[in-house]
Amino acid sequence: MFINNRTNRKHYARKRFGQHFLKDQNIINNIVASICPKKGDVLVEIGPGLGALTDPISRYLDILTVIELDRDLAYRLKNHPFLGPKLTVYQQDAMNFDFSELAKKQNKKLRVFGNLPYNISTPLIFHLFKYIEWIKDMHFMLQKEIVDRLVALPGSKHYGRLSVITQYYCQIIRILEVPSCAFMPIPKVDSVLVCQLPFTQPPHRVNNVDLLKYITMIAFMQRRKTIRNSLGDIFSEKSLKELNIDASLRAENITLEQYCNMANWLSEYKIDITI
């Protein structure tokens, strides 16, 4: 959601949609340069808002796909005199969007970007991971706290389920720090532009990714407990010992590789759990 003088028609940010419009032209230019759109790319913008990114990026493309939940903003973009003809506008929640269908239709991997609303950024990232094989890269403006969690390593207070799953799927690159004063209305937190590059091959083999997601969900729901307690209904101390994992460790001390090994152990022994 960005602000553009050529597309802004006195739209007021809606709190329920978590709207904060970027107003700094230098930052907008840096974002466009980082995304580096090229003719022939299939770019998808989540939350185009008032079109400050939509406008410059569309100049490189024949068609730009945008997903906008706000009915008023979607209507304005679709009917805009110079932007409208270059856009395919989906007025819907990105959380319900099937990105694989679009990629199949275009017969090309997607390049996804946007200034994600703070209130849905984490679940939306998880939603996009369902379609990771159809995505070439992702450039998102996120609140700094979320980016700290994306890149966190074991032992860090920021390390959690989001860290583990993101680092399984993607290389994460911090590109640009953005102060809160660059937005309107001004949010209470600073933001970071981050690039997520899906791995051709994940860093560790996992037979069933759903098991990895399940284990990390259970473990980090009780992150202050030892895994002897938090995962005790799934793993005995004997099984953890077989995996060379100390049962006295907490979820925040377990590495991505160890979580992957735990998921593969469950898969190999066909442990009956409900996901």
Image (spheres, rainbow, N blue to C red):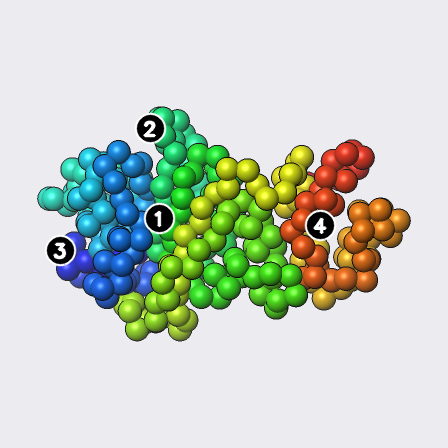
User: Identity of the amino acid at label 4?
Assistant: Gln
Local secondary structure at mark 1: strand
Q: Is residue 49 visible?
A: no
Query: Which quadrant holds residue 22?
Result: bottom left
Left-right relation of 264 to 16? right
Q: CA distance from mark 4 to mark 1?
A: 31 Å
The residue sitting at 16% across, 37% down in the picture is 85
Q: Which residue is mark 2?
A: 106
Q: Amino acid at mark 1?
A: Phe
Label 4 environment density (alpha carbons within 10 Å; few <14, some 14–19, many ≥20): some
Q: Disc 4 or disc 1, which is closer to the eye?
A: 4
**Marked residue nearer the N-terminal end (3 or 2):** 3
Label number found at residue 6: 3
In the image, farthest residue toward the left: 81
Q: Is the C terminus in the top left, top right, bottom left or bottom right quadrant?
A: top right
C-alpha separation, residue under disc 3 versus residue under disc 2 = 29 Å
10 Å crowding of disc 1: few (<14), some (14-19), many (20+): many
- Reading the chain from its start, which is encountered first: label 4 or label 1? 1
Check residue 270 in the rendering and tell me which mark sits there, or answer none: none
The label on residue 113 is 1
Q: CA distance from mark 1 to mark 3?
A: 21 Å
User: Where does residue 160 sit, x and y in percent of width and height?
Assistant: 61, 59
10 Å crowding of disc 2: few (<14), some (14-19), many (20+): few
Does dot 3 land on a helix, a strand or a loop?
A: loop
Asked if 63 appears above or below 14 in the picture, the reply is above
Residue that badge 4 annotates: 258
**Front position among marks 2 and 4:** 4
